[in-house]
Amino acid sequence: MSPHLNRRGFLKASAFTLGSSAALAATSPRVHAQAQAPDKILGTVIDFAAGVPDAQAIKAAGHSGTVRYVSGRRPGTESWMLGKPVTLTETKNNAALGLATASVYQFGKEATADWKSGAAGALIHAPQAIDFHHKAGGPLHRPIYVAIDDNPSREQYTTLIRPYLQQFNVLLAQSNYQLGIYGNYNTIDWAIRDGLGSFFWQHDWGSRGLIHPRVTIHQVADYQRNVGGVIVDVNNVYAKDWGQWLPV
C-alpha cells in the first residue's frame, strides 16, 4: 500500500517455498483461510505502487509473491503511481518463476477513501476490482482484499465500513470471488464478528502492537526494501493459502 509513517515498522524476512500451493489455490473451492499461530511466519510477500519490480529481482530477494492492486490510479497520482493496476504480463512473468499473486483493491485514500461512501461506494468499486482482477488473469474463487487503509472509529465502522464491506461481499460472491479485508486489528476483528471476510491482511496503524489470530498476511509499519529499483513493503505470511493465484 502507499507509505504511511504511522503504520509501518520492521519485520523479519523469512524464506518461503511456494511449491504447489499457489497452483492448487488457483482452482480451490471457497474456504475460510486458517492462519497458523501468529508467531509462525511462513515467508514473505511484497506490495508496491510506485513501480513494478522485475520478477527476477523479486525471486532473488527471497520473496514468494506479490499482493497487487486491482485498481486504477487516483487523480493526482498518475505521474508516479506506476505500479497500478497489475497487468497480465506482470502476473505471467512472475508465475514463470514460481511467484504467486494476490489481489487488493484501493482507489481512494484519506478524504476520498472508498469506504467513506458506504454501501453505495461498493456498487462503484466492486465491479472495477473484479474487472481488473480478471484482466490480470485472476481466476474465480480467489479473494480480493478490500482496503480499509485507516484507523477508523467503531462508529465509522458501523455506519460506513460495515455496509461497504457487506455490499462488496455480495457483489464478489455473485461473481464467484471471495472477500478479503485489508485493515488494522480492530477492523479485522469487527468484520469477523459480523461474519465478513475469509482472508485478512493486517496493517499496524492503530493495531496497538497486536496481531489478530486470523491474520493471513501482516504488513508491519515502516518495513520497506528496494527490490529491482522499486521501493516495496515487505509482509509476513501466516497462512499457506494467503489468497494467492496464478494467472489463467
Image (cartoon, rainbow, N blue to C red):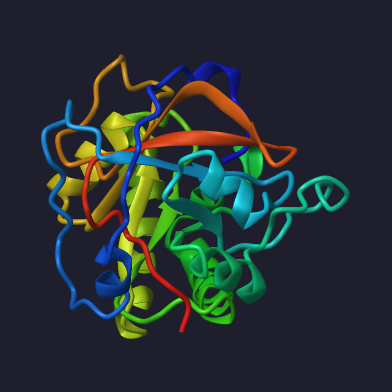
What residue is rendered at 55% in x and 43% in y? 60
What residue is rendered at 53% in x and 17% in y? 6
Tell me if 145 is positioned left or right of 242 in this view. right
Q: In which quarter of the image is the N terminus?
A: top right
Q: Nearer the viewer, residue 238 or 203?
A: 238
Work out whether residue 197 can be spotted: no
What residue is rendered at 61% in x and 56% in y? 55
Work out whether residue 11 can be spotted: yes
Residue 53: x, y in percent? 67, 49
Asked where in the image residue 131 lies, by quadrant, the reply is bottom right
Query: Please, which residue is most extreme toward the right here?
Result: 79
Q: Which of 13 and 234 is in front in this view?
A: 13
Q: How many labels does the image show?
A: 0
Tell me if 73 is positioned left or right of 212 in this view. right
238, above or below 136, in the image: above
65, above or below 48, in the image: below
37, above or below 195, in the image: above
Residue 15: x, y in percent? 35, 37
Residue 98: x, y in percent? 44, 63
